[in-house]
Image: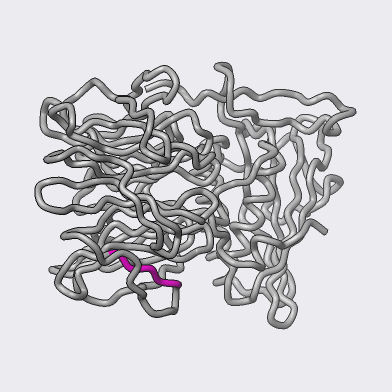
């Protein structure tokens, strides 16, 4: 497993005011040592909200893969130190190895919780970023994700995954229920209650499509959080593995009929369905779109064992992409376009995660000797991969960088969580559009 390929660059002063930019490329990276003391609780804010905020904010920074979040137990600075450069003893922060210092204050005014973030360079003592954002008073996690996103954007010049949403299945007894949640698995909302509902996926508009046995046969339904489920694909013996095109205008899915399963492409409402594979007695499943919507990767056993293939969205130009291993499945195409993550069964019958470079065919192993690891899904910016693992018993959702580093569990309660899918919809309009003031 290779180290995270990042390099810390200094951008010319005339371009970005000498702000350090973490560019995720190159080979000379070490995570940026960042000190993030507990937020300062000001007028109107309560300690419980501050603790909830702090938990979400710290998790975002830790899981991002670009920061080395320093242990607060080693901090030597005065706990009552202020928020401005003139009130901070930067030598104390240098003593603990911090290169950047981020301070947050929380205040509540009526129904709004306000957070102010200030970022300082420890070496120069200069303030590099000042951001203020609001969220409803009862949603400190939303505020935490918005401020963490602002910090991430400052260092990378791209959107973080912290405002995105995920969907997944919770297994409880004989039931398989679909949930939608914030990117870290929190603020979860159940879309189904009882029965068997599997393989959910988030559309760009925030709807969730999934295979359901609610009528004692596997059909695909679509549902908005808080809304009713509507049938989308009810043809064939089994409809599974739905995937939305990046623009949300088309869907791809697998339809089983007789002894074969073929990939179909249709409009997002299910109309105009057309088979784009044709392998009698062959199984073609698990479609995933390229970020430009022009190609589809999928799994097929046409060569004798399940392998990952790529084709044009109309079914032409089929090309086999994986040749190692004899059981490769659940591909997910990175939004950056370069990699496809997939699950493979190794020689010990354990499931692990790999990526394959779309252009070169190079395969990189991401997990090993840590139980079974399955069902990878890329973050909207392609920098992280979420997956299901049983390494600690049961099935839990974890996240890691796209090269397999910095593997951490989502902060969810114990349970059996399966088949995550990472969408692009923001957590809310407020957090997505909150501005810098």
Magenta stretch: includes residue 59: no
Q: Residue at x 55, y 72 (%)?
A: 48
**Residue placed most toward the observer, 66 or 104:** 66
Query: Which image quarter is the N terminus in?
Result: top left
Report if residue 345 is visible in the image.
no
Residue 142's quadrant in the figure? bottom right
**What secondary structure predominates along the stretch shown in magenta?**
strand
Report if residue 192 is visible in the image.
yes
Image location (x, y in percent) of residue 365: 32, 25
Residue 116's quadrant in the figure? bottom right
In the image, residue 389 sits, relative to residue 139, either above or below, namely above
Magenta span: 220-224
Q: Residue at x 34, y 59 (%)?
A: 200
In the image, residue 95 sits, relative to residue 209, either above or below, namely above
Q: Residue at x 60, y 33 (%)?
A: 33
- In the drawing, does residue 262 fall left or right of residue 409? left
Image location (x, y in percent) of residue 106: 69, 65
Query: Which image quarter is the C terminus in?
Result: bottom right
């Amino acid at each position: 497993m290779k180290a995270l390929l990042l390099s810390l660059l200094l951008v010319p002063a005339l371009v970005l005011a000498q702000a350090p930019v973490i560019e995720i490329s190159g080979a000379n990276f070490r995570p940026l040592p960042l000190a993030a003391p507990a937020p300062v609780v000001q007028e109107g804010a309560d300690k419980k909200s501050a603790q909830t905020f702090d938990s979400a904010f710290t998790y975002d920074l830790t899981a991002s893969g670009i920061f080395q979040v320093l242990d607060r137990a080693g901090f030597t600075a005065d706990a009552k130190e202020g928020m401005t450069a003139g009130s901070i003893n930067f030598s104390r922060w240098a003593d603990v190895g911090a290169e950047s210092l981020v301070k947050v204050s929380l205040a509540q005014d009526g129904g709004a919780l306000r957070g102010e973030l200030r970022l300082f360079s420890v070496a120069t003592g200069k303030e590099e970023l000042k951001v203020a954002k609001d969220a409803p008073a009862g949603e400190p996690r939303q505020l935490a994700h918005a401020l963490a996103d602002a910090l991430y954007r400052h260092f990378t010049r791209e959107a973080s995954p912290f405002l995105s949403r995920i969907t997944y299945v919770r297994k409880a007894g004989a039931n398989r229920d679909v949930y939608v949640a914030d990117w870290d698995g929190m603020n979860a909302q159940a879309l189904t209650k009882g029965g068997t509902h599997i393989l959910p996926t988030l559309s760009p508009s925030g709807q969730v499509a999934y295979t359901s046995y609610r009528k004692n046969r596997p059909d695909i339904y679509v549902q908005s959080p808080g809304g009713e489920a509507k049938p989308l694909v009810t043809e064939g013996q089994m409809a599974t593995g739905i995937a939305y095109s990046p623009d949300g205008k088309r869907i791809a899915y697998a339809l089983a009929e007789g002894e074969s399963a073929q990939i179909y492409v249709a409009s997002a409402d299910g109309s105009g369905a057309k088979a784009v594979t044709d392998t009698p007695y062959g199984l073609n499943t698990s479609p995933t779109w390229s970020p430009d919507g022009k190609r589809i990767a999928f799994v097929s056993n046409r060569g004798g064992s399940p392998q990952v293939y790529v084709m044009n969205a109309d079914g032409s130009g089929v090309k086999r992409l994986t040749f190692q291993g004899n059981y490769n499945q659940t591909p997910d195409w990175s939004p950056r376009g370069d990699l496809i993550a997939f699950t493979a069964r190794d020689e010990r019958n354990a499931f692990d995660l790999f990526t394959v470079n779309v252009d070169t065919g190079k395969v990189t192993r991401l997990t090993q000797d840590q139980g079974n690891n399955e069902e990878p899904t890329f973050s909207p910016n392609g920098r992280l991969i979420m997956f299901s693992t049983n390494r600690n018993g049961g099935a839990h959702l974890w996240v890691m960088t796209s090269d397999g580093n910095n593997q951490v569990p989502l902060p969810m309660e114990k349970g059996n969580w399966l088949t995550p899918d990472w969408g692009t919809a923001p957590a809310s309009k407020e957090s997505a559009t909150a501005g810098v003031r």
